[in-house]
Amino acid sequence: MSHTQSLSDTIIALSTPPGTGAIAVIRLSGPNCIQWTAENLRKPKLLEAESHTAHFGLFRNPEGEVLDEVVTTVFKNPSSYTRQDVVEISAHASDWIIEQIIQRYLQQGARYAEPGEFTFRAYMNGQLDLSQAEAVADLIAAESQEAHRLALHQLRGGFSREIDHLRQQLIDFASLIELELDFGEEDVEFADREQLAQTVTHILSLIQQLIDSFQWGNAVKKGISTVIAGRPNAGKSTLLNALLKEDRAIVSEIAGTTRDTIEESIVLDGIPFRLIDTAGLRDAADTIEAMGVKKTYEKIQSSAIVLFLFDLSSTSPDQLKADIAEFRDQNYHIIVLANKTDQLSAPELSAHQKAIGDIPILPLSAQFGQGIESLIQSLIQFARDSQQQAGSAIVTNSRHHAALTRAHEDLQRVLEGLQTGITGDFVAMDIRQALYHLGSITGEITTDDLLGNIFSNFCIGK
């Protein structure tokens, strides 16, 4: 986004997706949008219309020819999304009509809006702070109930209030230390160092909670990474298809059919999961297979959940114990699945359970769909437990996560400085740095580069 453009220009964009449809919405924001619309509809009374009212009219070109029957909705400043006058024109979704209407406004002096420029104006005019503006893009991109809930919470200012509360506590103490520095030579101490250390410790724990919540927030945004792993021909692709209820992966009797990873998305109880079917874990026979197995291990290391599938009919308890040993004491959650249980009896499964001890084995038959519902409930339960651990304010944005991490480092230095009796000017400097990083989240502190980077990722018309 170029910030050389004036905020007082009247901007225009098509806000609905291009293509065949019944209605297209063309959106304008700026000081002239109502005046120009009144001229195009030949409705001078539109200038006196109340905010949030809709008006039927005939949209005409300068020669007086009717281009379309439209419904125009008027939003008057400051009661609009951008806190400027806003007009939304609902026209018939013909590419030719849309183009003619937009061209008419361009002739009158409007200009095309840049990506995210309506939301940028909402931010610049104080309607939204920066983290709320970013939540608008997340809300548009939300593909699951949980992603929608988190984006809406952020849009409504839930996350911003947490950050403002943390900043205010720091500002109160920083001002006392700054006051001490003003008195410099008089050796007075306004800020109780012990109390400051307690406050900083408390804020550090709150920031750490937010940093930790990013694991859940990011997972919801992108889908909880769930790797299906196991030996070749254990039935991984059959399990993927059973979960998706579709034949997406190639299923064959030949060991090592999946040489690369296959990724698919599924939403369970409003929570998105990214299912990753991987190459079988074994000594690879050729270079391509070796690359597939290497990729499998990389996917496993970066996943949140590993579904380890083994063929109960061809895997001994000792073999299973050796395989599972590789997966213990890792950052991911492991669910062990005994496949093809339709072919064997319960005592054989108990021998495998005894071999691996503390990790419960879920029995299933991927081919016949037995045990799939129990597996789905286990996945949902893991997600709900993770959600509870994350708390109410959840970080979903990697920029916010980076800023919180830097603020945490700054405050760690403040705490160390207080414990070693460092002078007030150094303490103040580190607190100022922490305030800077926290302020960059909500937009108290911004740069043109930062704003350009954020708003350039928006769709045009928003």
Image (tube, rainbow, N blue to C red):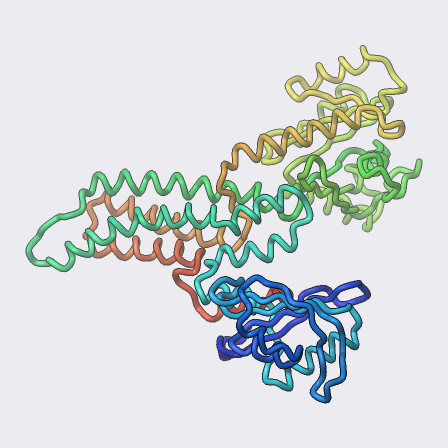
Residue at the extreme bottom: 63
The image quadrant that residue 43 belongs to is bottom right
Location of residue 254 with respect to 116 vertically, above or below: above
Look at the image and tell me in which quarter the C terminus lies. Answer: bottom right
Asked whether the viewer can see residue 454, the reply is no
Left or right: residue 447 versus residue 133 is left
Give coordinates of residue 210: x percent, y percent.
Answer: 46, 43
Left or right: residue 282 versus residue 269 is right
Residue at the extreme front: 45
Give coordinates of residue 28: x percent, y percent.
Answer: 60, 72
In the foreground, 170 or 14: 14
Q: Which residue is painted at 81% across and 14% down in the image?
A: 348
Left or right: residue 94 versus residue 197 is right
Give coordinates of residue 144: x percent, y percent.
Answer: 68, 44
Q: Which residue is painted at 85% across and 29% down in the image?
A: 366
Give coordinates of residue 146: x percent, y percent.
Answer: 62, 41
Location of residue 286 with respect to 459 vertically, above or below: above
Residue at the extreme right: 253
Q: Which residue is painted at 81% across and 42% down in the image?
A: 284
Q: Which residue is painted at 75% across and 22% down in the image?
A: 362
In the foreground, 214 or 112: 112
